[in-house]
Every structure is written in structure tokens, then in C-alpha cells.
Image (cartoon, helix red, strand yellow):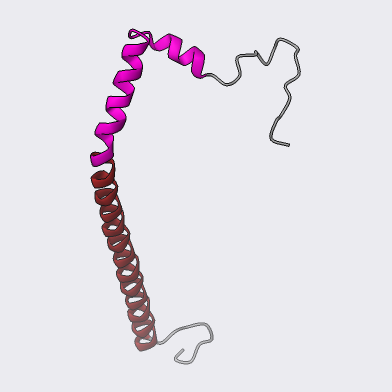
Amino acid sequence: MKGEAGSVPHNEKQKQEGHIWGSMRRTAFILGSGLLLLVALWNSVTWHLQRFWGASGYFWQAQWERLLSTFEGKEWLLYILGCPDLASPWDGTERVNSHQ
């Protein structure tokens, strides 16, 4: 039968497929452009941060080496002195929060 309910004519089916492919192309273009823009922004930020930290990185490396030579290379001592809270959570003592 020519006018059956639920059947889609052939030319309408082609239009629908063309619309789907057009939508997919637009979506791919938008997502691809967004990804390209994101990567370009990320590379730009990374480059600027490397320039900044490259200049000041030598300063901080020199400070670390000076501190390490002060403690005669005993990194474990720096670790122990740098720990803000050495109390074990299992020793039964209550900690006081000074930020309240």
C-alpha cells in the first residue's frame, strides 16, 4: 500500500539522514574548535609559567641547596622539623584546631 501509516517516504528519509550528518559535522566542528582553543590556551599558560619559574627557579634551588647544606644533607631531619603535627591519630590525644 502506498499510504501506509508509519512508513516514511524515501525522500524524507534522505532529508532526515542529511540533517543528522549536518548536525554531526557542526558538532564535530564546535568540539574540535573548542579543543584546539583549549590546547592553545594551555600551551600559552604553560609557556608563561615556565618563563616565570625558570627565572625564579634558580633562586629557590639555591635556597634549597643552602638549607640542605645547613643540615648537612640530612633530609629526614628537615622532614621531621617541617611536620606541623607529629601526634599520631591513634594515640588517643585530642587535637586543638587553632583556625576556629
**In the rendered view, does 84 fall on the left or right side of 72?**
right
Query: Mostly what secondary structure, the magenta segment?
Result: helix
Corner quadrant of residue 59: top left
The residue sitting at 33% across, 23% down in the picture is 64
Looking at the rendered structure, the number of numbered marks drawn on it comes to 0
Front position in the image: 18 or 91 = 91
Q: Is residue 6 above or below residue 75?
A: below
Residue 17 position, x and y percent, is: 35, 78
Q: Position of residue 99 (x, y in %)?
A: 69, 35
Is residue 63 placed above or below 1 in the rendered structure?
above
Please state the extent of the stretch shown in magenta in the rendering.
Answer: 55-82
Residue at 25% over, 44% down: 50
Q: Is residue 79 magenta?
A: yes
Q: Nearer the viewer, residue 94 or 100?
A: 100
In this picture, is 75 found above or below 5? above
Residue at x 32%, y 25% (from the top left corner): 63
Q: Quarter of the image holding residue 90?
A: top right
Q: Position of residue 11 (x, y in %)?
A: 35, 88
Locate residue 1, reporting x and y percent: 46, 89
Task: Work out which quarter of the rendered image holds the C terminus and state it.
Answer: top right
Determine if the magenta segment contains residue 36: no
Q: Tell me which residue sits at (72%, 21%) in the image.
A: 95
Looking at the picture, tell me which residue is in the foreground, 53 or 29: 53
Give the quadrant of residue 62. Answer: top left
